Image: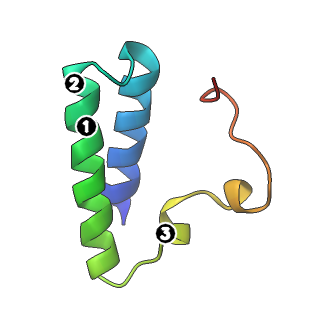
Amino acid sequence: MRRARAAQHRAARAITRHGLAHPLARTLLAAAALAAAAAWEAGHHVRDIHSPALHQGQQHHGTES
């Protein structure tokens, strides 16, 4: 679970810094997808990866366009 969350954060930071088309961002996004799939297979739910604030209707500041 920690790996999936960390991979998601690394990908988000790379996308914010370099844009979605950058090779590093795309690689980290693919790694995050694989980590999330592994967490799902291990029995975790999507809500386990994302912070509760996102599920209560609050927006995460700093990543919106």
Q: Secondary structure at mark 2?
A: helix
- Residue at the disc numbered 3: 46
Q: Of the residues under marks 3 and 1, which one precedes in the sequence?
A: 1
Please tell me which residue lies in front, 36 or 1. Answer: 36
**Residue under the image location 34 percent in, 57 percent down:** 4
Residue located beneath label 2 in the image = 24
Residue type at the position of mark 2: Leu
Residue at 34% from the left image edge and 75% from the top image edge: 40
Instruction: Label 1, secondary structure: give it.
Output: helix
**Tag 3's secondary structure?**
helix
The color scheme shown is: rainbow
> In the visual, does 23 lie left or right of 21?
left
Q: Are marks 1 and 2 in contact (CB under 8 Å)?
A: yes
Q: Earlier in the sequence, mark 3 or mark 2?
A: 2
Quadrant (top left/top right/bottom left/bottom right) for the C terminus: top right
- The mark found on residue 50 in the picture is none
Q: CA distance from mark 1 to mark 2?
A: 6 Å
Q: Is residue 65 above or below residue 51?
A: above
CA neighbours of label 1 inside 10 A, class few (<14), some (14 to 19), many (20+): many
Q: Is residue 63 left or right of residue 14?
A: right
Question: Does 26 appear above or below 33?
Answer: above
Quarter of the picture containing the N terminus is bottom left
The answer to whether residue 3 is above or below residue 11 is below
Q: Residues within 10 Å of mark 3 (few under 14, many from 20)?
A: few
Residue 51's image quarter? bottom right
In three-dimensional space, the C-alpha distance between marks 3 and 2, rounded to whole angstroms, equals 24 Å
Residue on which disc 1 sits:
28
Q: Disc 3 versus disc 1: distance between alpha carbons?
A: 18 Å
Residue that extends furthest to the top in the rendered view of this protein: 18
Amino acid type indicated by mark 1? Leu
